[in-house]
Structure formats: structure tokens, C-alpha cells
Image (tube, rainbow, N blue to C red):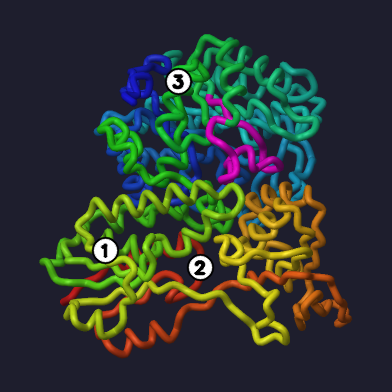
Amino acid sequence: MNYEKLFERGSIGNVHLKNRVVMTAMGVNLANSMGEANEVITKYYEERAKGGVGLIITEIARIDDEFGVGTPNQLSVTEGRHIPHLERMIETIQKYGTKVFIQLHHPGRETKSHLLGGKQIVAPSAIMCQVTQEMPRALTTEECEGLVRKFIKGAVIAKTAGADGVELHVAHGYLLNQFVSPYSNKRTDKYGGSFTNRLRIVSEIITGIKYMCGADFPVSVRISADEYVDGGLKLEDSVKIARTLESYGIDAINVSSGTYESATTIIEPGSYPQGWKKHLAEEVRNNVRIPVIAVNNIKDPETAEKLLESGVCDFVGVARGHLADPYWVKKTKEGRSDEIRKCIGCLNCFAELNQGRHIKCSVNGALGRELEFSSLEKNGHGKTVAVVGGGPAGMQAALVLDQKGFHTILFDEREKLGGTLNVADKAPIKEKVHLMTNGLIREIEESGVEVRRNTKATVELVRSLDPAGVFVAVGASPTIPPIPGIDGANVMKAEDVLTGKSTPQGKVAVIGSGLTGLETAELLADRGHAVTLVEMQKTIGPGVNRTILADLMMRFGKHDPTILSNHRLMSISKDSITLMNQMTSQPSMVEADTVVLALGVTPRREMVQAFSESFENIRVIGDADKAGRIQEAIKDGYTQAFAFTTY
């Protein structure tokens, strides 16, 4: 595929772009606590600019320090002191031929009071967001007028710092979206009621920006073309909004969808196909003359090219794709699209932000740490390093060690590399994990790493190599508690069920509702089994990202499973299990022909100990050190290998 449309030049207003790929805005939480663009966030954006993207729309930049904080370390455009820092960041991006828009943002009711120093959150109307679960205070008319001035000031600061344009965030249930939508705006003053009044605050902001920054200063507006909530904006409403915004003089419309209350339609989990909401952008584009940017859960350039070819949009938004691989565009242009590390839709990036931490990625261990990892020391000098275990941590470590100049030998007991990835991709609608597995294997095969498959790396074998260092990435084993009946023929491990090694019969009890347990339960319910899901903790899905959980439970719930939280497994028989209610201490019996254990994993301590006692320069990584998610394994492998030295 030659991607003619993808690499066609385009324009937004008077700003000319070298291609049709836009890195749309994503919160990253990498600025300093005062909202200044520091070296960390600058390096993050520089990597994406080096990667060849045509336009970067920055993360949410707050325009109000009092009530407009979305994340602890987001960019800010509230004061003149932000200008020199923004200027350095923008100049760094622009030197690669990439243009920059600053996204202007206010969360409204979609924030938390602890981010505001304990102040009550604000919104157009005193209507609670069902996700944040905090009652907002309705803004006064005077406060609304003040916010208009703050948005305009933010645009002036952005332009002064050298930005090529700005984007107003009127999507995803944030403040300006709250004003526009009848779902969240019940005001009776000039900023509520009629269609015109609900759009008034956006109209005043656009008019003010064009007056203060010049009519030729580009303004993009991001909208949720369908909020996917009862009583919210639908596509026909948003087409009217788009036409009206065009009449206000904006230069582009960025079409997205959803609010926090329909979060799976904003940042889609892996179950959503690429291009699933193309109808939204296409309908908007059919009704306006200005360029349309469309986000569509795009993972690969083939899908992006097809969207452009079919006239769905003028520019494709590739957001998380640039988190996973900053060189998404460059690799595509050079005919190396098969080398792109593709987003797998796990949403761990979003989960990190929800915890107030900087963004991270399961696929890219360097995300958010680009400055730290900007200078790779080539200190291997051909010395041998053994990596024991070919799972995600082991493969990532081997790749970095190879780049550092070590003769890296990677051992794995199986024919296929991948470790736990070869289990994770067997769950329902988890095929995208396969992209990661195959991508890592391809990188290994194209590197200088020596791979020894079907080989058990004993201490003696590794010692015979006289290695300068050993990386132990032997993973973890399923946790099996000492419970009566646990060794029965009707008891199986979740990973064996997922891989097809074991086949449950009849009624099935799945013990444990972490992600593996949930996915196994869904798989079995899909096959027609009556499933009982048992969880010790008070709520189902402990530790599972709430968006992933909501998406999975929506599918699983259609099978009408029995769900028992706050219950402990006490014993297993051939046709039932005995549970204890942890609230009442009352026992109960549940019929079960098969019991599937999904109780987490335990590091393989004996293997780790054997290597630790035999070698001095050793690193224990991934699940072998501490059981965790794919994200932790990749990060650990990358970090430990990056810092490794034989001095």
C-alpha cells in the first residue's frame, strides 16, 4: 500500500500540514506542578514530531487555575509566565516540520474537588456526573462571562508562544460540552435554554479569539457528535452544531464522541473495531465545508488510508497509536508499517491518569520517560548477556541489551516466544494482544539477539556461556491455595482453559474476578456454560480498569451469570463448592461440575533463587520479580536493560 492520501499535504485555515495525520489531544500529566512545559513534556512531544506527524494537538491545557484543573500536572495557559516554557516546547516540535495547536480546556463537573484544593466543582447546572460522583455548583452568569475571557486569554498566550493554532475542547462531557448539551445544561439565563443560548459561550469564545489573535489564526473545535447518553446530544444535533460553528468562523472540526458517563465511546477498549464511529465524522463532513478531523480508534495506517480514500474525513486522528509508537508516521512512510508497535486497547494509559500519575503504555516502556531514556549508552562491547525467559519482559530487555551492543542470548522453553501474551490473546475480543506478541517477535528476529527456543536454561547451561550478566524473566505460576478438593480432576487453571489445554464441563464456578477470571468467565458463558463467578473482595473486578470492566460486564451480563462477591472458597467436591459469606460468616453450597481457578500468579521463586545464588550481575524482571500487568513487564524490561552495565 502506498498511502497516497495519508501523505497528501493539507491545510487548516492558513496552516499547511505536510500530511494528513493528526496526533489528537491526550492528557499526559507530564508538565510541572505549575503547569509549565518542562523538559519532560517537551521531549515527549519531540519524539512524536521526529516521528513525522503533521499536526500535534497538545494535551488539555487549563485556562482556569481555580476551578479548571483536570490533572495535577497538565499544561496551563493562564499566566504570562507560561509563555517562555510553551515557546521552547513549540519551537522544539516545529523544527521537525510539525505544526502545533494548543487545546484549551476546562473540565467543569468532570473533575474532583481534591484537585481544586477542596473547592466545590463547577458546571453550567447543579447536575452530578455519575462517574465523578460530586455535586457541582452552578456557575453564575458573571462567572460564565469570566470564563469566556479566560479561554480567550489562553488562546492569546498560545499564539504569543508561537502556536500555529488552538483547539476548543467542546467534547467528552467537559465544561463547554456541558453548556452545549441539554443533558447537562438546565440554565435559564443567556447561557441556557435555546440552542443558540446553549452555544453562546462557545460563540463568544470563538469571536473573542478571532478578534484578539486575528481572523487568520486557526481555531479547531472538538465535539462529541454523539454523547451516547439518554437525553444527550445525538448526531443530528451535532450536525446542526457543526454548521453553526462553521458560521462562527472556525477552521476545523475534530469529531469524537461520548462523555465520562459513556467512556467506552471516548477511549475505546480493545473490543471496539477500528473505524467503528466513522459514520459520525462522515455525516458532519457531508454538512460542512471546513476540514474534518476524525478519531476512529485507528491502530494501523491501512485503516487510516481507507478512511481518507472513502471521504470520511480530511485528516485522521491517531492518538494512542502515537503513545505506543512515536514513529507511527515515519515507519509508514518508509514502507515499514509492519514494524509499528500497535496500541492494544488495554487502557492502562488512561488508568494511570485516573490515579493522578503520568501516562504510561503497555506497549512502549519509554512513554513519559523520553527524556530519561534519550541517551542510550552503548556499553556492551560484544559481551554476552543471557536472558532467561521469552515473555514480554524478557523480549523487551533483550532488544534494549542488543541496542547497547551486548551479545544477547534469549532462552525460552517453548517454541513460540511471548510467555503470558500467548495466554492473554486467547480471551474474548483480545486479538489485538496478538499484534503486540507478533510485533515483539518480529523485532527480536530482525535484531541481533540470538534466540534459543525449546531450551530450558539451567544454571549450568547459562554458566557455560560465561555471561557478563543474567536477566531472569521466568515469569510466574498460577496461585493454588491449600483448599480441600483443590487437586480434584474437576479443578482447572484459568490459563489452561483459555489456551484450550483443559475443557470444562457442565456448570462452571470461576474463582477470582480479576481480569483473567472475568475473561475466562466470559469465554465460558459464550460457550453456553452456566457460570458462577466468585470473588473474595466486596466488588467484582478488583484492580481492573473501570472502562474495561464496564465494557466486559456489559457483554458478560447478557448471559445472566451468578455473581457472588464477598465470598471465600472453602472447599471443592466433585459437583459443588462450599463458600463462606465474609459479611455474615454463613456457609453456602453452589453446584459446580467444574471449578476454574483465577487467583492470580506467584513469582517462580525457586528458579529465581537458583540463578541469584549462582551469578553476581543478575537482574530479575517482570513477573519473576513481582506479578503485574503487561505494562509493568515491558517497563521493567526496558528500564533494567537501559541501566545495565558490566562495570
N-term mark: 1 or 2:
1
Q: Residue furthest left?
A: 381
N-term mark: 1 or 3:
3
**Residue 436 part of the magenta-drawn span:** no
Q: Give the x, y percent position of residue 117.
A: 62, 56
Dot 2 alpha-carbon crowd within 10 angstroms: few under 14, some 14 to 19, many 20 or more:
some
Between 220 and 135, the residue placed more toward the observer is 220
At x 47%, y 52%, the residue is 359
Q: Give the x, y percent position of residue 126.
A: 79, 40
- The residue tagged 1 is 451
Q: In this view, does 533 lie to the left or right of 408?
A: right
User: Which numbered circle lies on residue 56?
Assistant: none
Which residue type does callout 3 highlight?
Leu
Would residue 71 be visible to someone looking at this image? yes
Residue segment shown in magenta? 254-275
Q: In which quarter of the image is residue 562?
A: bottom right
User: Which numbered circle lies on residue 308?
Assistant: 3
Would residue 211 be visible to someone looking at this image? no
Q: From what the image shows, is residue 251 above or below residue 325?
A: above
* Gap in angstroms between the C-alphas marked 1 and 3: 41 Å
Q: Is residue 616 left or right of residue 68?
A: left
